[in-house]
Structure formats: C-alpha cells, structure tokens
C-alpha cells in the first residue's frame, strides 16, 4: 500500500470485474477508501475481498446506473460510509456487437444508451452535486477508442454510445471546472478482459489476432488502463481538464 490517495474516497462503478476491478484495486493500493458498485453482489464481494486481503478498505453497493434513484442512493451511501467523495470513476458499461446498423435491434440500442450514456450522465450529476458543495473533486469516465477515435463494422451502436461519453466528458468538464471539479476520460482499446474476446475466441487466439491488428502487438493490461485513470484523478494532473486519454496500443493513431 502507498499513500498517494491517503484520506481520499473513490467510487468506482462496474467494479466487479475487468477494468473496474483493476481501478478499484489500484485506488485501494494508493491508500484510498473505495466504494465499489455494480449489479452483481457476488462479483463486487470478490473485489472487496481482494482489496481487504491487501490491507485496503472497501465497501460494495449494488446499483443499476441507468436508474437515477439507484445512482443518488449509491452516492449517498458512499458519502455516509466514508464521510465524503473525492474521486469517481464511471466505468459501468455494456457491449452489443456483431450486427450492421440496419439490423441493430431497438432493444440493444436502448440498452447501450441506457447504460453507457444515461448511466454516465446520471452518475456525473449525482457525483457533481456532492463535489461542488464540498470543495471539488475529480471524475474519470471510461469511454472507448471505438467511438470518437475509431469505428469498426458491426459496432455502430456501441461506438455511438462511447462517442457520446467522450462528448459528455468534455462538456461537463467545461461546465464544472469552475466548481473545482476536474472531469476527464480514458478511452481503452482492446484490453485483457472478456469484452475484447470475439465469440468463441480463446485468450491465445486473441493474442494471435492482436499481433496482426495492433501496432503494439498485444492487448493492454487492465493495470495499464488503471494507471491512466489514477493519473487523471491525482494532483499530478491538476491542470488536465476535458482530456480523453486513449490507451489502445496505437490502434487509432
């Protein structure tokens, strides 16, 4: 454990696995108290157990970020449990892929917008409401290199939702930097999570594919993405406002 975020409280949504779990573990290792949120109590409990095993402090809250009441209650409980909220990472997201735009089901489109876009909006509104009344804070939204930075066939809905996250981040940053709140985004490319696996693909198969598709020749580790998030949330990024940091091994360069 280090003291980089000693005395701080961080909230991470979608923290039951993948990038969200890595981010939560990294904040805890930096000394922050961490509120982890998601839909699955079981996976969140796993994240909390990993944090506590290393001597960190964490608490889990189940919430659906597409529901405003859930989000407001999540922030209220995190503040009540730890006495404040200094950092928020809005990571919860879903992927619907494989269909050309003309065949994208309306239900899938609405699911993408509800979680990936409205979820980020609702989370920021609740987080900002607390932060601007208590001296400010830092928010990092997880977008994607697919969206504002790159497009691929079969991913129109997902790309549109993540492009919206990039735009929302920049707009919110301009709206609230005067409140002492720095808002930025991280846009990962293919990372070491199940979301980057094609249907039926193994990790070994993905590694072979990435040697051809990625200039770097591999996926990013979740720890590498987490390191970018922690930088943007830290005092070292004190003049970084409205940035969208792409972590994709050069795929969208």
Image (cartoon, rainbow, N blue to C red):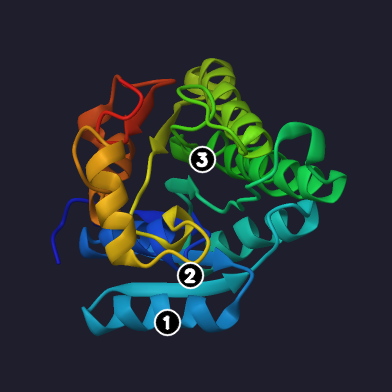
Q: For the residues marked 3 and 1, what is the alpha-carbon distance in whole angstroms?
A: 31 Å
Tell me residue 205's x, y (percent). 32, 61
In terms of depth relative to the viewer, which is nearer, 145 or 3?
A: 145
Residue beneath disc 3: 134
- Which SS class for mark 1? helix
Tell me residue 250's x, y (percent). 26, 28
Q: Is residue 232 left or right of residue 96?
A: left
Tell me residue 158's x, y (percent). 62, 39
Residue 221 can be seen in this image: no
Residue beneath disc 1: 46
- Which SS class for mark 2? loop
What residue is rendered at 39% in x and 56% in y?
Answer: 19
Disc 3 crowd, CA 10 A, few/some/many (<14, 14-19, 20+): some
What is the quadrant of the N terminus in the image? bottom left
**First along the sequence among labels 3 and 2:** 2
What residue is rendered at 39% in x and 22% in y?
Answer: 243
Give the answer, above or below, for where 179 lies relative to 102.
above
Disc 1 crowd, CA 10 A, few/some/many (<14, 14-19, 20+): some
Kindly check if marks 3 and 1 are in contact, taking CB atoms under 8 A apart as contact.
Answer: no
Disc 2 crowd, CA 10 A, few/some/many (<14, 14-19, 20+): many
In terms of depth relative to the viewer, which is nearer, 163 or 171?
A: 163
**First along the sequence among labels 2 and 1:** 2
Kindly check if marks 2 and 1 are in contact, taking CB atoms under 8 A apart as contact.
Answer: yes
Residue 151 can be seen in this image: yes
- Which SS class for mark 3? loop
Quarter of image, res 237: top left
Q: For the residues marked 2 and 1, what is the alpha-carbon distance in whole angstroms?
A: 7 Å
Give the answer, above or below, for where 54 lies relative to 35.
below
Residue beneath disc 2: 16
Q: For the residues marked 3 and 2, what is the alpha-carbon distance in whole angstroms?
A: 28 Å
In terms of depth relative to the viewer, which is nearer, 115 or 54?
A: 115
Q: Residue furthest left?
A: 2
């Amino acid at each position: 454990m280090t003291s980089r975020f000693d005395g701080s409280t961080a909230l991470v949504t979608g923290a039951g696995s993948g990038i969200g779990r890595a981010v939560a573990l990294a904040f805890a290792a930096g000394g922050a108290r961490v509120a982890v949120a998601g839909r699955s109590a079981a996976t969140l409990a796993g994240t909390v157990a990993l944090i506590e095993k290393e001597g960190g402090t964490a608490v889990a809250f189940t919430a659906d970020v597409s529901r405003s009441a859930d989000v407001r209650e999540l922030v209220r409980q995190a503040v009540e449990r730890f006495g404040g909220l200094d950092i928020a990472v809005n990571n919860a997201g879903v992927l619907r892929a494989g269909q050309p735009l003309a065949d994208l089901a309306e239900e899938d489109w609405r699911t993408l917008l509800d979680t990936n876009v409205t979820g980020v909006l609702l989370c920021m509104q609740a987080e900002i409401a607390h932060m601007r009344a208590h001296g400010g804070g830092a928010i990092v939204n997880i977008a994607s290199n697919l969206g504002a930075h790159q497009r691929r066939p079969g991913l129109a809905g997902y790309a549109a939702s993540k492009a919206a996250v990039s735009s929302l981040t920049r707009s919110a940053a301009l709206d609230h930097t005067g409140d002492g709140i720095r808002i930025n985004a991280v846009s990962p490319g293919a990372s070491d999570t199940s979301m980057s696996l094609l249907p039926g693909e193994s990790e070994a198969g993905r590694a072979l594919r990435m040697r051809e598709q990625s200039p770097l020749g591999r996926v990013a580790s979740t720890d590498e993405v987490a390191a970018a998030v922690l930088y943007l949330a830290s005092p070292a990024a004190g003049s970084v406002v409205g940035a969208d940091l792409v972590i994709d091994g050069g795929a969208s360069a």
